Image: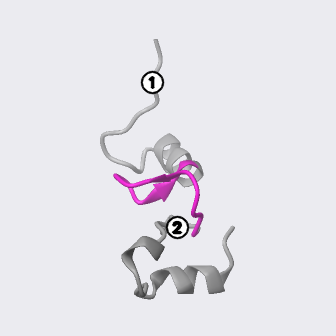
């Protein structure tokens, strides 16, 4: 989990656009971020398994 100071720093406008870092809005994780959902892979999986993300379901074949 990201610290509160890291999350607060990421929400501020960066001086340069290359310094901006995408973070999960739920937990603040910076790595394994999915742009389409605004979540990290861990939070995405949790919400998808609970059925809280519309149009996403676990595949089985």
Q: In which quarter of the image is residue 17?
A: bottom left
Q: Can residue 49 be seen in this view?
A: yes
Seen in the picture, residue 49 relative to 15 is either above or below; the reply is above
Furthest residue toward left:
55
Seen in the picture, residue 1 relative to 11 is either above or below; the reply is above
Residue 3 at x, y = what percent? 68, 78
Separation of marks 1 and 2 at Cα, in angstroms: 24 Å
Residue 7 at x, y = what percent? 57, 79
**How many other residues sit within 10 Å of disc 2, few (<14), some (14-19) or many (≥20)?**
few
Q: Is residue 20 visible?
A: no
Q: Nearer the viewer, residue 14 or 2?
A: 14
Q: Is residue 49 magenta?
A: no
Q: Which residue is drawn at 41% across and 51% down?
A: 52
Q: Quadrant of residue 12?
A: bottom left
- Which label was assigned to residue 59? 1
- Which label was assigned to residue 43? none
Instruction: Point out the tag, 1 or 2, that comes first from the N-terminus.
Output: 2
Q: Name the residue under label 2.
A: 26
Residue 55 at x, y = what percent? 30, 40
Main SS of residues in magenta: loop
Seen in the picture, residue 28 relative to 52 is either above or below; the reply is below
Q: Do the residues labelled 1 and 2 touch (CB within 8 Å)?
A: no
Q: What element carries label 2?
A: loop
The number of numbered badges drawn on the structure is: 2
Q: Magenta residues?
A: 28-41
Colour option used: one colour
Locate the N terminus by quadrant: bottom right
Q: In the shown orientation, is residue 55 left or right of residue 4?
A: left
Q: In the shown orientation, is residue 29 left or right of residue 17?
A: right
Q: What element carries label 1?
A: loop
């Amino acid at each position: 989990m990201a610290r509160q100071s890291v999350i607060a720093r990421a929400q501020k406008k960066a001086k340069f656009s290359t310094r901006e870092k995408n973070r999960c809005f739920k937990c603040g994780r910076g790595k394994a971020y999915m742009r389409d959902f605004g979540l990290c892979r861990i939070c995405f999986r949790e919400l998808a398994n609970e059925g809280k993300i519309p149009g996403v379901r676990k595949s089985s074949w």
